[in-house]
Amino acid sequence: MSIANLNLIFKPKRIALIGVSTNPNSVSGKTLSNLVGAGYTGVVYPVSADHEAVLGIACYAGLSSLPQKPDLAIICTAANEVPSIIKECVANKIYGVIIMSAGFKEIGKEGIQLEEEIKLAKQAHPKLRILGPNCLGIIVPGLKLNASFASGLPKTGNVAFISQSGALCTSVLDWAIQEKIGFSYFISVGNSLDVDFGDLIDFVGEDDNTKSIILYVESIEDARKFISAGRAFARSKPILVYKAGRFPESAEVAASHTGALASEDAIYDAAFQRAGISRVYHISEIFDCAELLGRNKIPNGDRLGIVTNAGGPGVMASDKLIATSGHLATLSDETMELLNMHLPAYWSHRNPVDVLGDARAKRFAKAVDITINDKGVDAVLAILTPQGMTNPTATARELIKVAEKQKKPIFAAWLGGSSMKDGIELFSNAGIPAYRTPEQAIQAFMTLVSYSKNLEQLYETPRDIPLNFKINRATIRKEFLEHTPSDHSLISEERSKKLLESYGIATSLPRMAASEQEALALAAVMNYPLVMKIASPDITHKSDVGGVILNIENEQDLKHSWKKMMQEVREKAPNSIIEGATLQPMINLADGVEVLLGSKKDPVFGAVLLAGMGGTQAELFNDRVIGLPPLNERLVRAMIEPLKVYQLLDGYRGAARKNINKLIESIIRLSYLIADFPEIKELDINPLLVTETEVIALDARIILESDRTISPKPYAHLALEPYPEKYSKEVGKVKGSLVKLRPIKPEDEPLWLKLLASCSKESIYSRFRYMFHWDSHDIATRYCYIDYSREIAIVAEVETESGKELIGVGRLVADPDHDMAEYAILIADKWQHQDLGNFITEFCLEIAKDWELKKFVAQTTTDNSAMLSVFKKHEFISHYGSDSSVEVEKQLV
């Protein structure tokens, strides 16, 4: 994450336009016209060696001849000239650049080479920030800055629009100007050579004027940066995304069930959900949702009240609401009484509230007012159709009066033609979203409802599931890789299952027989019935070639099965090496539900985990879901609950409920395995049998990367930073109890709340600098659910007679550029003055140095002598304020 120098691009005082042309219809001509014609108050320097002036503005021959150094250079030259111009920018200490020029990686090899030249210049000069190439430019309405070749300047607003498509930008811009939707930023990212979605989400997320963000995404390159930025702001600023390219025409043939089922689009879905970002699936929804976001009205739930003057459109809206999993609000008795008082006797007497076709403006608005004030209603959709007694404009005026008094969203569907135009215009000016059809309104409403639900689900407190492993995980990894030859990619079923067993996932371990005689000898000491599977390093889908035989009942059956299998496999896979067959106990599948678990390596998002319906028909039913490791109990539960197979696990039609908790634990254990082994390309457990009591892997296969060169950065194969176990240590005893320092985790929420409950008002004020109202789940999630790539909280934990207890916490929050971290600490009252603050601060300083931070800052007060003493001990510099505050800092580099 880096927002360094982005102000040079988005808040420039001086702009150089390089490659300006006298052709008013060229990219540079339109950009210059926009820069000087939109009201921008900064200075614009046209740069061209070929022209004396353009649009009556004097041109400069080069950057070195400019009277003052510009903050931003906009390049509109031919692509092959751009690398040399970038070097000229650096030579003149111009570190903000927008490259509008096309002809880069989008045209192939020649363009890719040009981008590589620019990247080399960027690497040599980290201060340089580049937007583009091949981009439309930017618009900042608040500065009246139109640094693009798009026509028009939208209103100043609170929505940041960021798009990879310049053509879509122009369409959205035309619509926004017509609908009077305002934007804080309007950004075309182009090829994202430097500045990408992650940087821009961080930048606009920090902006006070930006309340929500809309993204048009074609591809993501830095998955971890994108998800981290999304998670950082999605809770406070709704982020909506439209992902283009859902169905690629060709895909690499997968070697496993997991590879076949884990499509690129499903992985993007999982990433958006994990980041708290809500996805829209139709381009029209971007416009519809922008209406709601631009008006800054976010519903708190999916209980919708509908008020209409015609029954049919109310039914249409209800159908769409229910089809998209929303709920018609149930009106309270008090609401029904009020509606009875103010509506004719023949009104609908239910939701949708049909006020009848002869409703005048005041009757319609009164019905909306009564409905929106029902505690069981989260929002109201007002639907008006043109009828003989209808005055759409007057009704809009009355509805605006109701909406002005409400925090809940009210939105309108004004159906019809020219008679509705003036009313819609009034809504637009008043900030009330208005749609042409009920279905559009419902879809926009439900998209924002899904945003709220995603966040609620993401921050639910998980149940703590202690995971114990037979031996140290690092030892497991070392032994497994030492016994795996570098030229072996497909790992045998036996070794795959042994690895699963070492991570606590139960399996039916097979036993190898190289010949029929060995198989008979093994069977003599095993209990029938048995399962026999072909053993071949070349065959992954054994059932497809006759390589699996079930229910072998006796010796005669085994002899027959051996001959039959070997013959059929040689016929269907003649080029495969056959090493023999494996035998394992036959488990009655009727006692359980078959589930598929797996993992694959995605080129963008790294290792992903898949769960779904198992068995030989897994691809046919396509009942699966993708998750991004690492996973906890709540995330796994949220993954599997929407699956159809979950109904079978939960006791479908009176069947016994299966051991779902054990299944969840197994998936968590698998996510640990995936995190620990970046060498794993694909992994299949199919089927995983889930019974009332047990969860057992009946078949498993692992495929390793052929190139096992691993990134020196730990967990680089994951899109999310996992729990940093390395930052854990014991620091001795305090008041007779052994103190362990470790990072906080979501499961700690109850302990964190208990810690704050044990603190005095003075301690709370000293930590948070105001009377912090901490006692709520929403507040706790902000401190216990951490993106470990941005911040870390180290808790001091002791074991007491009543169980584990948190007695202190120190928190490090890094800035987006990871240069500086703010530090704060809280010690429970009864554990103060025991040197605990020193232990935590010292450990957090070690972490800050490990993060390669440059500066460590904190704030306290003059009466907090204990912490002042700690800071003095560690050689912090103190700055005393006039209000008893003390700012302390320490340079780490």
Image: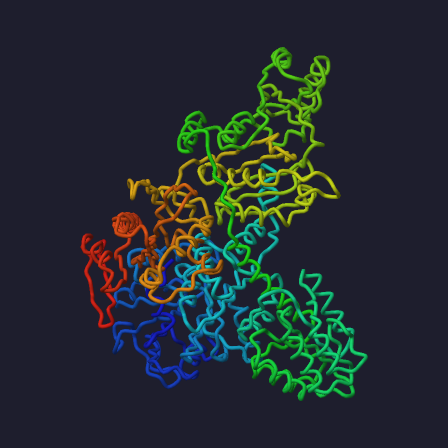
Count the numbered circles shown: 0
Say if residue 786 shows up in the picture: no
Horizontal placement of 343 versus 145: left or right? Answer: right
> Camera-side residue: 283 or 658?
658
Residue 380 screen position, x and y as percent: 65, 73
Is 179 rendered above or below residue 876? below
Question: Residue 537 location, x and y as percent?
Answer: 56, 26
Location of residue 344 (image quadrant): bottom right
Name the residue: 37% across, 66% down.
Answer: 771
Q: From the top left corner, tell me how far across and down residue 353 is, in percent.
A: 73, 75
* Residue 186 in view, yes or no: yes
- Choose between 435 and 857: the one closer to the eye: 857
Residue nearer the viewer, 484 or 767: 767
Question: Residue 367 appears at what percent x and percent y?
Answer: 69, 80
Report the colour scheme: rainbow
Hey, which quadrant is residue 10 in on the image?
bottom left
Q: If the image is split into quadrants, where does the C terminus sit?
A: bottom left
Quadrant position of the N terminus in the picture: bottom left
Picture quarter containing residue 123?
Answer: bottom left
Q: Is residue 663 above or below residue 125?
A: above
- Residue under the point 40% across and 51% down: 788
The vertical placement of 362 against 441, above or below, is: below
Position of 700 compared to 122: left or right?
Answer: right
* Left or right: 650 as drawn, with respect to 537: right
